[in-house]
Image (cartoon, rainbow, N blue to C red):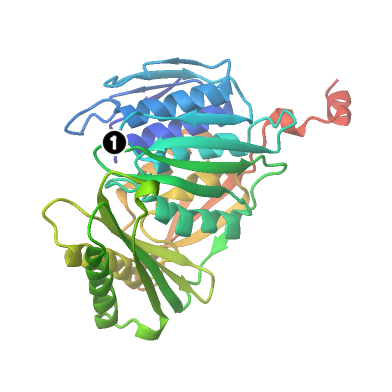
Amino acid sequence: MEQIDGSTLEGGGQILRNAVSFAALLQKPIMIDKIRASRKQPGLKAQHAAGLNLVGRISHGSEMQGASKDSSTLQFTPGDLVAGSYSADPGTAGATTLLLQIALPCLLFANSNGVNTSTLRLRGGTNAIQAPQVDYTERVFLPFLQRHFMVNVGLTIVRRGYYPKGGGEVSVTVPTMKEPLPAITILDRGTVTSVRGRAYVAGLPKHLAKESRDAAVALLVKKGIDPSVIDIEYVREDAAKAFGAGSGVVLWAETDTGCILGGSSVGQKGVEAAEIGREAAEELERNLTQGGCVDEYLQDQWIIFGVLAKGKSRVRCGLPLTLHTRTAIWLAEKLTGVSFTQIPDEEGKTMVLECEGIGFMPKSHKETPQDIMEER
């Protein structure tokens, strides 16, 4: 059983999600201790436990101990990944996007069992702090997977849910892969051709969304973005499609080489609407200034897919590498045996991350009658 120190580097939920996904795919039993040891409230939160139990259901015949709230140790012996329809609900405002993160790699390579597409119904928060907003996942992360890894994941926002009650729901469709993911090469950031976005409020006056939008536009123009390429909408969510009150801004910039980089901010009590817009614009501008082909969140999210891909993947990232990225690399090397090479540019402004993927496909997917006869 592979031992994993859950307090290493980032020391949070990311170690948990990536480790369990890798374990389920590689059929490798793991034990994680010191889970979220450096957090104010260590151990599993409801959202983490919901994600772990979701993988436990996808991994038929698995054994999982410690997958409950406040637990600081987890043991997981995986079973057979099986495509199908699954759901998860932490009963809190825990992020639906983080539930998707842990389940997605597992479902991509699940035994189809005659099912070519799996479905997920994920409940909880859709727009929260310390997690990707669902709009970022929809507009940046999933298009990245489709363009570069040829994975077409569908996402529908059924209902938005906000802190502290949650109550949101998203529906996701995940294809069953018939061959390994392709390696990717993304080295040229290119020139920004458009900046789009969404400033929203739910259960609050619409003019607050407009104030956020206007502040975001003003800052982007001040930082040198051509106003003619900026298109940010402002909306008040339909009360029938939103649970609770919330606000925020999600921005994404597209370049002429196909890169998409994001910036976002979530409204909090006591923070002015204009400040929310400025925070999102500053984050986007920072990611653009760093010169990477991925933003600070995609920087670590592509790692698990690059490791599973067949061939050498190379992605230019901005500096410094985030703690989440360093953690994802450490865990991937520990559990799969891959090695990452870090190649800085001559000016030391960006870093190319390079790895030779394992070309993962479950053995059961590879076996044809001819394969079985040759083994015998």
Mark yes or no: residue 28 visible. Answer: no
**Of 324 and 339, which appears nearest the observer?**
324
Percent coordinates x, y for residue 253 in the rendering: 42, 70
Quadrant (top left/top right/bottom left/bottom right) for the C terminus = top right
Q: Is residue 39 above or below residue 152?
A: above
Percent coordinates x, y for residue 4 in the rendering: 38, 27
Q: In this figure, what is the number of numbered marks? A: 1
Left/right placement of residue 178 relative to residue 332 reads: right
**Of 149 and 96, which appears nearest the observer?**
96
Q: Is residue 218 above or below residue 53?
A: below
Q: Residue at x 37, y 35 (%)?
A: 15
Q: Residue furthest front?
A: 240
Which residue lies under the disc numbered 1?
Answer: 11
Q: Is residue 109 above or below residue 280?
A: above
Q: Residue furthest left?
A: 270
Mark yes or no: residue 168 visible. Answer: yes
Disc 1 marks which amino acid? Gly
User: Residue 364's image quarter?
Assistant: top right
Percent coordinates x, y for residue 172 in the rendering: 54, 43
Q: Is residue 191 above or below residue 80?
A: below
Left/right placement of residue 247 relative to residue 152 reads: left
Q: Residue at x 16, y 33 (%)?
A: 40
Q: Residue at x 58, y 15 (%)?
A: 61
Neighbor class of circle 1 (other Cα within 10 Å; few <14, some 14-19, many 20+) is many
Q: Does dot 1 land on a helix, a strand or a loop?
A: loop
